[in-house]
Image: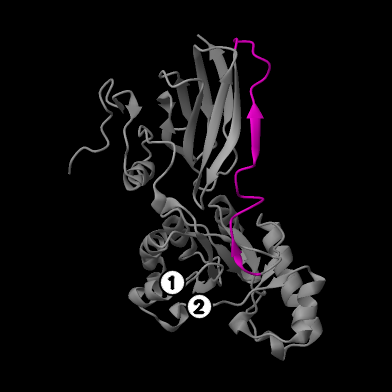
Amino acid sequence: MPDIFARPRSGARTRGGRPMRVAASLAAIVAAAGIVTVTVDATPSQAATCNGYVGLTFDDGPTAGNTQNLLTALRNNGLRATMFNQGQNAAANPALVRAQVDAGMWVANHSYTHPHMTQLSQASMDSEISRTQTAIANAGGGTPKLFRPPYGETNATLRAVEQRYGLTEIIWDVDSQDWNNASTDAIVAAAARLTNGQVILMHDWPANTVAAIPRIAQGLAARNLCAGMISPTTGRAVAPTGTGTPPTSGPTTPPPTGGCTATLSAGQQWSDRYNLNVAVSGSTNWTVTLNLPSPAKVIATWNTSASWPNAQQMVARPNGSGNTFGVTIQANGAWSWPTASCTAT
């Protein structure tokens, strides 16, 4: 296999004074390998543009046998999803609920024991929902805002109970049939039917579903669709906002003891990564150090000469392109911005 991950020789990152263009797919490969030496232009590949959002949902977790495999597949392919957890499973596997959150997923309510809710009394409906809210919150999954009734069965009584807990009922637009032993090909084909705003039903436990994840990611990217969150207001898939996404403003370094200041500002954002712009003032000879929250990685830079003392730290210096540079950060579930410090040299 060619050694595509070897560090370029000195001066190999630019051609004619301009950053070399590197395919977005190569950047993704490098990110997956934990290598962060690729320099690309400021605008990522058009294929990464989100012209719409879809909701990937997985019911019945978390399960000791498969949840971690599912989370690994989703993270490795830059996808986020909504996990409709059973309360009894959340109570039995609190570490896996936390793993879902740490992987950048949204956690939602799927009842406590997965009964036919419309066959229950109102008091029993209330118990199923309230116990699940408590189990998920106690496990570190936050307070769910979404509820999916088992089997998609609902009625006015159930919806009244949901409203009592501030829950929005989410069914689905596309059924992957993974619960019915659908093949990996069939699950991929089901995901290919998704359009902007729609939600697909999948499950935490089928092996074929995990196997389908890389191809689902490829299919969405080919159609410029991104995996989004489900809006508690509309029940539709939308761009990620709030907890689990990068903030719209970030830290500025303290008053410059080293003679310069670095100010971070938001750039473009995708379902799995985001751009940051860094403006340096106070000096034209500067060194900016970015410390990233683990396991976030820098997968691209522009207008700077960068080095990496370790996987979570990047050191940026001028490369003749001025005092503003940028980075693309693969979040890997860690959406907090890096901290920045600036020293005049």
Amino acid beneath label 1:
Ala
In this rendered view, identify the residue nearer to me: 333 or 299.
299
Residue 202 within the segment the image draws in magenta: no
Task: Mark 2 or mark 1: name the one nearer the start of the chain.
Answer: 2
Tag of residue 174: 2
Magenta segment includes 254 = yes
User: From which residue to which does the magenta span run?
Assistant: 235-259
Q: Which of 221 and 1 is in front in this view?
A: 221
Looking at the image, residue 159 lies above or below residue 227? below
How are the residues colored? one colour
Q: Residues within 10 Å of mark 2 (few under 14, many from 20)?
A: some
Nearer-the-camera pick, 55 or 40: 40
Residue type for callout 2: Val
Residue at 36% across, 42% down: 27
Residue 238, x across and y down, in percent:
60, 61
Q: In which quarter of the image is the N terminus?
A: top left
Q: Do the residues labelled 2 and 1 touch (CB within 8 Å)?
A: yes
Q: Give the residue drawn at x 48%, y 20%.
A: 322
Is residue 4 depicted above or below 141 in this figure? above
**Residue 191 image label:** 1
